[in-house]
Image: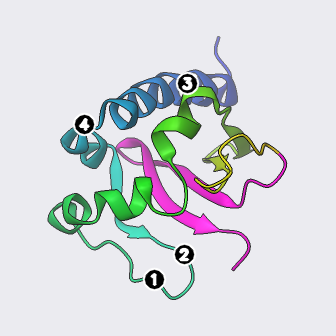
Amino acid sequence: MLFPSAFAQTDFSAFWKKFKSAVIAGDKAAVAEMTKFPLSMPYEVKAVKNKENFLRRYDEIFKGEANAAQCFAGAKPYKQSDRQYDVNCPFKETPNDREDVPIRFIFEQTKSGWRFAGLDNVNE
């Protein structure tokens, strides 16, 4: 018998592999399909309302303060709860700094499975 948390972890692991691969490949459409809207953004940055808005703002989200493709290649997701994981990245100017990782990509379990749910800068 599987315990719900064990299932959630396995489920997230499969989602993370797929999401990470899509970001690294620059597959915007696939990434959009794995995103929850509205997508929460850092302090004083407008939320991303829908898929069209997401596709327009893709570079801002994944190549803005952090280089997500570069970061995700070696990043390890941190479990915040059974329903949330975070992936923390350094600023793109300091890609090898694993101590200062203020850019947080937030993933949540929704009714339709795991989704990318938010972007945050913990310094703000």
Which stretch appears magenta? 99-124
x then y, percent, for residue 115: 42, 47
Q: Distance between the residues labelled 1 and 3?
A: 29 Å
Which numbered disc, 3 or 2, marks the residue that appears first in the sequence?
A: 3
Dot 2: element: loop
**Disc 1 residue type?**
Val
**Which is nearer the eye, 112 or 93?**
93
Q: Do tag 3 and tag 2 residues touch (Cβ < 8 Å)?
A: no
Q: Name the residue under label 4.
A: 27
Q: Residue furthest bottom?
A: 44
Amino acid under disc 2? Pro
Residue mark closest to the camera, 3 vs 4:
4
Nearer-N-terminus badge (4/2): 4
Amino acid bearing label 4: Asp
Image coords of residue 63 (percent x, y): 42, 55
Q: Mark 1 points at which residue?
A: 45
Residue at image coords 34%, 51%: 35
Distance from the alpha carbon under mark 3 to that under mark 2: 25 Å
Q: Which residue is drawn at 54% across and 63% down?
A: 65
Which label sits on residue 113? none
Looking at marks 3 and 4 on the same chain, the residue that comes earlier in the sequence is marked by: 3
Categorize mark 3 by other alpha carbons within 10 Å: few (<14), some (14-19), many (20+): some
What is the distance, in whole Å, between disc 4 and disc 1 at their CAs?
A: 24 Å
Q: Nearer the viewer, residue 6 or 121?
A: 121
What label does residue 42 carry, if any?
2
Q: Name the residue under label 3.
A: 13
Badge 4 marks a residue whose secondary structure is loop
